[in-house]
């Protein structure tokens, strides 16, 4: 891969955008590569959690590579490449609604536009204290169409979300933490340790229980509370029949750490 890196250590996948020279902004080829990387993670039953970040210390991702877009638009129509967005969305992630493994966004700097939209599609955001986030698309004649206009009002109080979206203002990361958008803010030097702490706590849990929890929580939001409780969730069905559903109570009774198998 030229524009991203996929690494796996134990049960953890690390997906990194490798375009620091443009603040990890994404153009069409980068979107395609990231979509394939997320496909690999989704298909690997031995990969239980993912950490998503950008290379360098300046940016998680500055979103869409507008310079690339502008350059392509200057070409004669017949020479312009077909730049279709993957069906899985910006970064191969923002429209991926069937991935119930946990994803941690390691926000190491700017997360703007599509960069924030990718972080919003993750389950946990851990950020360096110099980071800034925001959806400045209206300042460029655009909208946060990679689900940002829909996710931000669901993850912030409505007035706060609208205030930032309608002005394109950046959100200082400490304010994002106060509003509940970010889970933890630490100095850059402590960012990796903070992320690994979250990873370790997730890995202490049964992987099928984690997936069942994420699926029920996210899909249940589409229903009134009573109906959400009556729905059938695929991963909860798998968890109930799994070896881990036996191992958890047994390990507790035997006063030992459980040996999760993910099956």
Image (cartoon, helix red, strand yellow):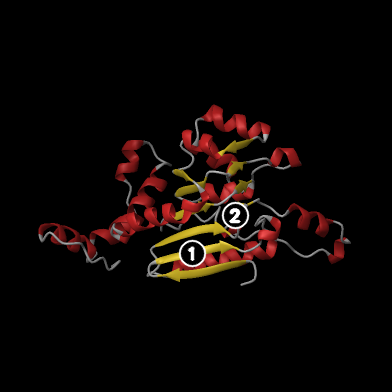
Q: Earlier in the sequence, mark 2 or mark 1?
A: 1
- Of the pair 199 and 220, the residue shown nearer to us: 199
Most extreme residue toward the bottom, as rendered? 1
Crowding at mark 2 (Cα within 10 Å: few <14, some 14-19, many 20+): some
Total labels: the figure holds 2
Q: Where residue 31 sits: x, y (%)? A: 63, 61
- Are the residues tagged 2 and 1 within 8 Å (C-beta)? no
Q: Secondary structure at mark 1?
A: strand
Image check: 210 left or right of 247?
A: right
Most extreme residue toward the top, as rendered? 159
Q: Quadrant of residue 70?
A: bottom right
Q: Where residue 95 sits: x, y (%)? A: 55, 53
Residue in view at x 72 percent, y 55 percent: 65
Q: Quadrant of the C terminus?
A: bottom left
- Of the pair 120 and 80, the residue shown nearer to us: 120
The residue that mark 2 highlights is: 57
Q: Quadrant of residue 100?
A: bottom left
Q: Secondary structure at mark 2?
A: loop
Crowding at mark 1 (Cα within 10 Å: few <14, some 14-19, many 20+): some
Q: Where residue 93 sits: x, y (%)? A: 54, 56
Q: Where residue 214 sits: x, y (%)? A: 38, 51
Q: Nearer the viewer, mark 2 or mark 1?
A: 2
Image check: 93 left or right of 251?
A: right
Most extreme residue toward the front, as rendered? 189
Residue in view at x 34 percent, y 40 percent: 227
Residue 14's disc number: 1
Image check: 228 left or right of 257?
A: right
Q: Quadrant of residue 197?
A: bottom left
Q: Quadrant of the N terminus?
A: bottom right
């Amino acid at each position: 891969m030229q524009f991203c890196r996929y690494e796996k250590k134990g049960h953890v996948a690390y997906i990194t955008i490798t375009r620091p020279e443009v603040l990890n902004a994404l153009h069409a080829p980068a979107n395609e590569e990231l979509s394939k990387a997320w496909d690999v993670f989704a298909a690997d039953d031995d990969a239980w959690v993912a950490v998503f970040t950008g290379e360098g210390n300046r940016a998680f991702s500055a979103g869409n590579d507008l310079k690339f877009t502008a350059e392509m638009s200057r070409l004669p129509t017949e020479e312009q490449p077909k730049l279709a967005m993957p069906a899985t969305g910006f970064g191969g992630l923002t429209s991926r609604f069937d991935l119930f493994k946990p994803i941690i966004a390691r926000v190491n700097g700017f997360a703007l536009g599509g960069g924030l939209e990718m972080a919003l599609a993750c389950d946990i955001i851990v950020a360096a204290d110099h980071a800034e986030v925001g959806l400045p698309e209206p300042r460029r004649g655009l909208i946060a169409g990679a689900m940002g206009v829909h996710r931000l009002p669901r993850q912030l109080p409505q007035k706060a979300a609208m205030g930032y979206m309608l002005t394109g203002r950046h959100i200082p990361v400490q304010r994002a933490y106060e509003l509940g958008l970010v889970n933890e803010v630490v100095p850059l030097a402590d960012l990796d340790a903070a992320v690994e702490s979250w990873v370790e706590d997730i890995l202490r849990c049964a992987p099928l229980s984690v997936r069942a929890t994420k699926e029920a929580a996210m899909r249940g939001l589409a229903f009134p509370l009573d109906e959400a409780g009556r729905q059938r969730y695929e991963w909860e069905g798998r968890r109930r029949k799994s070896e881990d559903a036996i191992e958890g109570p047994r390990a507790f009774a035997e006063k030992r750490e459980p040996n999760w198998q993910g099956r």
